[in-house]
Structures are given as structure tokens and as C-alpha cells.
Image (cartoon, rainbow, N blue to C red):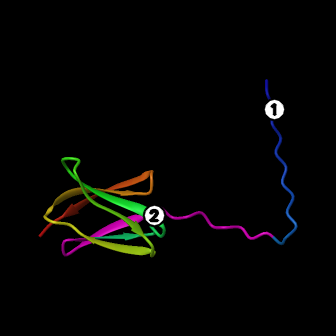
Amino acid sequence: AVTAIFASQHTGDESIEAPHAAPAVTVQEGQLTITGAANSQIRIYDIMGRQIANTTSTDEICHIKVPAAGIYLVQVGDRHIEKAAVWR
């Protein structure tokens, strides 16, 4: 059996960062709004897997207009993927 013991010593001078919330995608008037994606690469794919947008967000909120109504996959960074339905 393997036993691991982890110890941590805090001096009180360290700052503790809160965990980052997952990016959120909302849809309004044919536009995707991605929040929580500062300094992240954002890729948008249509339901057929074709990439229709590829940008890097410099702000906390990014707006991307899509060409038509449909189902889109929004990838933020390397891991977070969310589905969005756009109706017109």
C-alpha cells in the first residue's frame, strides 16, 4: 500500500484565487455572447462540423454574429464546449 501525506504551510501573506467559472454562452438576435472567456481562443462550428469563426477574446465578454439560424458548437479554450441554438 502507498500512503501519501501532503502538508501545506500558510504565512497569511498568500492570496487565494477563487476557481474560475465555466464560460457561458447566450443567444440573442442571431448573435452568440460568450462570457467568462477572457484571453481564450473561441471557435464556432456549425452542426456539420465546419468551423465558421475562430478568434481570441481579449475581454470578459465576446460577441460573435453567426451567418444563419441553426445549432452551433462553441469551443472556448481547449476543453469547454457548449451547444447553442440560434433562431431567427
Badge 2 vs badge 1, beta-carbon distance below 8 Å: no
Q: How far apart, in angstroms, are the residues tagged by discs 2 and 1?
A: 38 Å
Counting from the top left corner in percent of width and height, residue 20 is at: 55, 64
Amino acid type at mark 1? Thr
Which residue in the structure is indicated by mark 2? Answer: 40
* Residue on which the image places disc 1: 3
Q: Secondary structure at mark 1?
A: loop
User: Residue 30 lies in what quarter of the image?
Assistant: bottom left
Which quarter of the image is occupied by the N terminus?
top right
Quarter placement of the C terminus: bottom left
Residue at the outermost top position: 1
Q: Which residue sits at x=13%, y=63%? A: 69
Please state the extent of the stretch shown in magenta in the rendering. Answer: 14-31
- Secondary structure mainly formed by the magenta segment: loop
Residue 65, position in %: x, y?
23, 71
Q: Residues within 10 Å of mark 1 (few under 14, many from 20)?
A: few
Identify the residue at horizontal 51%, vertical 64% (top origin): 21
Q: Is residue 88 left or right of residue 80?
A: left
Numbered mark located on residue 83 in the image: none
Q: What amino acid type is highlighted by mark number 2?
A: Ser
> Where is residue 18 drawn, in percent x and y?
63, 67
Q: Is residue 13 magenta?
A: no
Q: Residue 13 in the image: state x and y as whole percent.
A: 83, 72
Q: Is residue 56 left or right of residue 65?
A: right
Quadrant of the image occupied by residue 19? bottom right
In the picture as drawn, the residue positioned furthest to the front comes out as: 55
Name the image quarter holding residue 70: bottom left
